[in-house]
Image (cartoon, rainbow, N blue to C red):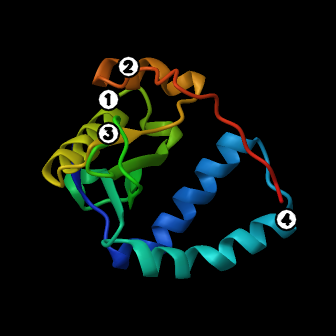
């Protein structure tokens, strides 16, 4: 048995929701019950509206592609006003790169990320960006991502 890569479609939304929740739990450590309920409530509609349009997802499935998702990565494609870094204004933002724990250390995240980068090239995106965790940093560097160093990430909760 092996793995196979493929695009994620709307039929995969229930599994995609569970993978998103597993990613968030891994990223945040834990999620309050009320927050989890609220997130789960919004995800089906979000994925229904965006998946296959401006949201691209690739997954590695176990059992030669017939089994459950073992690793996944998503990319939101957006248009911004052009600047020297993205002269056409089309960029991809990668998020939710997640490998199910029992499938880690097998190169699966590299495969889904490589598929996203190839998809970005075929769409002629100017730039693909992401925020790397410490665990993913070396992987992204080895694929060709570089530190942007132009700005410091900041946020506010209004």
Please identify the quarter of the rendering in which residue 140 is found.
top left
Single out the mark in the foreground, 2 or 4: 2
Q: Which residue is mark 4?
A: 33
State the image coordinates of residue 16 (x, y, percent, origin top left). 47, 65
- Going from N to C along the chain, the mark reached first, 4 or 3, is 4
The span from disc 4 to disc 3 (Cα, nearest Å) is 31 Å
- Which secondary structure, mark 2? helix
The span from disc 1 to disc 2 (Cα, nearest Å) is 14 Å
- Going from N to C along the chain, the mark reached first, 1 or 3, is 1
- Going from N to C along the chain, the mark reached first, 2 or 4, is 4
Q: Could one spot residue 99 in this view of the protein? A: no
Which residue is located at x 58 percent, y 22 percent? 134
Query: Mark 2 and mark 3 in contact (Cβ < 8 Å)?
Result: no
State the image coordinates of residue 147 (x, y, percent, origin top left). 46, 20
Which residue is located at x 49 percent, y 22 percent? 137
- Which secondary structure, mark 3? helix
Is residue 95 left or right of 120 when viewed as pictured? right
């Amino acid at each position: 048995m092996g793995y196979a890569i493929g695009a994620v479609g709307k039929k995969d939304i229930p599994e995609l929701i569970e993978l998103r929740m597993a990613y968030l739990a891994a990223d945040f450590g834990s999620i309050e019950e009320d927050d989890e309920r609220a997130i789960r409530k919004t995800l089906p509609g979000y994925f229904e509206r965006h998946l296959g349009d401006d949201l691209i997802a690739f997954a590695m499935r176990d059992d030669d592609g017939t089994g459950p998702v073992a690793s996944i990565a998503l990319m939101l494609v957006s248009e911004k006003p052009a600047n020297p870094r993205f002269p056409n204004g089309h960029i991809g933002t990668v998020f939710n790169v997640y490998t199910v724990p029992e499938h880690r250390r097998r190169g699966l995240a590299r495969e889904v990320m490589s598929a996203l980068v190839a998809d970005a090239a075929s769409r002629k995106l100017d730039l693909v960006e992401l925020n790397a965790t410490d665990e993913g940093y070396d992987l992204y560097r080895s694929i060709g991502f570089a530190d942007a160093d132009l700005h410091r990430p900041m946020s506010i909760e209004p």
